[in-house]
Image (cartoon, helix red, strand yellow):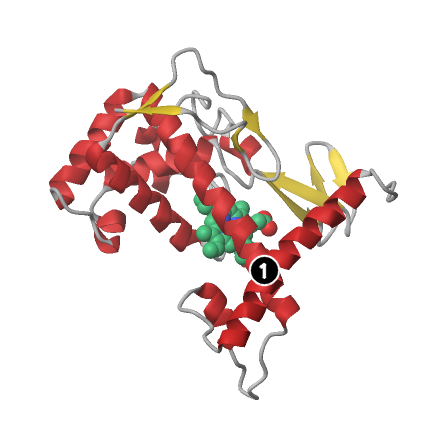
Amino acid sequence: MLRGPGSPFSRLRRVRQTLDGIILGEIARRRREGHAGDDILGLLIEAEDSEGERFTDEQVRDQILTLLFAGHDTTTSTVAFLFYELARHPEWAERLAAERKAVAGDGDPDAAQLFGEMPELDMAVHETLRLYPPAWIGPRRSAMEFEFGGYRIPAGLPVSYSSWASHRLPEVFPDPHAFKPERFGPEGRANLPKGAYIPFGGGPRICIGMRFGELEIRAIAATVLRRFRLDLEPGWSMRVRQMPTLSPRGGLPMRVV
Ligand code: HEM
């Protein structure tokens, strides 16, 4: 709770000012040049409601920060964990490379192919998100009184769900710490209890970027698999960073083969 000079809070405020400076500076530059740009920032700057009202610069900044932290970190971490597991399971790396080649040859698969025609990639991505759900904990508040595991939870109490914990329940996912994409075959998926697999959350606040994130992960994986195998550095071992999202601590050094 200390807020004076040298405290974590004042450091946070300084970093926040730097981020604000970068984003607000970019918004100002685009407004000045009269060209909002063809990207998501441009869409937000130009968006209008039915009365012609636009976002303020601060609202645009807030949206951009949300997209950066909710959308970028989560996706890149998942790609890293996917290649980590593929390096440890070369038979899966080969299966995915073969599937990619059968679907797209020497080209790149399009979105419909990435989602509809590559079931092995689909299973591997889901198994990665099961083992390493980047947003591994979600804050909620109990809407009404309930009992769970012998505890009485009153209404209005902060309660967190953890996809990490749910995804590793042995009664739902036998041998829960092992990377076994087969579990996400059609039959396995159909038999999952509701709420057991929730890397994107659930309910009204489910991830708004789910399909986009899933597409990015598949597109990056398919592009890399077209020409490369990624091996782990000998002797390197994974340590998982927990905040703000799960990711390999200090990055994931790999050998490009
Ligand atoms: C592998 C990729 C991703 C994962 C695992 C992921 C996971 C999640 C989870 C678990 C939540 C719900 C948090 C809660 O319980 O309250 C969430 C919300 C959200 N995500 Fe994602 N996400 C991913 C990619 C993306 C992308 C690519 C974007 C945007 C381009 C995005 C934008 C958001 C936003 C804006 C919310 C808040 C939605 C709301 O509160 O209504 N996410 N995400």
Determine which quarter of the picture holds residue 56: bottom right
The residue depicted at 44 percent of the width and 41 percent of the height is 76
Q: Is residue 134 visible?
A: yes
Left or right: residue 42 versus residue 93 is right
Q: Position of residue 45 (x, y in %)?
A: 52, 73
Q: How many marks?
A: 1
Q: Quadrant of residue 11?
A: top right
Q: Is residue 235 above or below residue 82?
A: above
* Residue in the foreground of this view, choosing between 27 and 230: 27
Q: Is residue 208 left or right of residue 63?
A: left
Furthest-bottom residue in view? 51
**Who's the residue at 36% across and 30% down the image?**
83
User: Residue 68: percent from the left, percent from the top?
Assistant: 53, 52
* Residue 205 seen anywhere in this rendered image of the structure: no
Residue 53: x, y in percent? 59, 83
Which is more toward the observer, 186 or 145?
186
In the rendered view, does 133 fall on the left or right side of 186?
right
- Position of the N terminus, as image quadrant, is top right
Q: Secondary structure at mark 1?
A: helix
- Which image quarter holds the C terminus? top left
- Residue 126 image offset from top left, x and y in percent: 38, 38
Disc 1 residue: CB within 8 Å of ligand 1: no
Callout 1: 10 Å neighbours few (<14), some, many (20+)? many
Seen in the picture, residue 241 relative to 157 is either above or below; the reply is above
Amino acid bearing label 1: Ile
Residue ID at (43%, 11%): 235
Residue identified by numbered label 1? 23
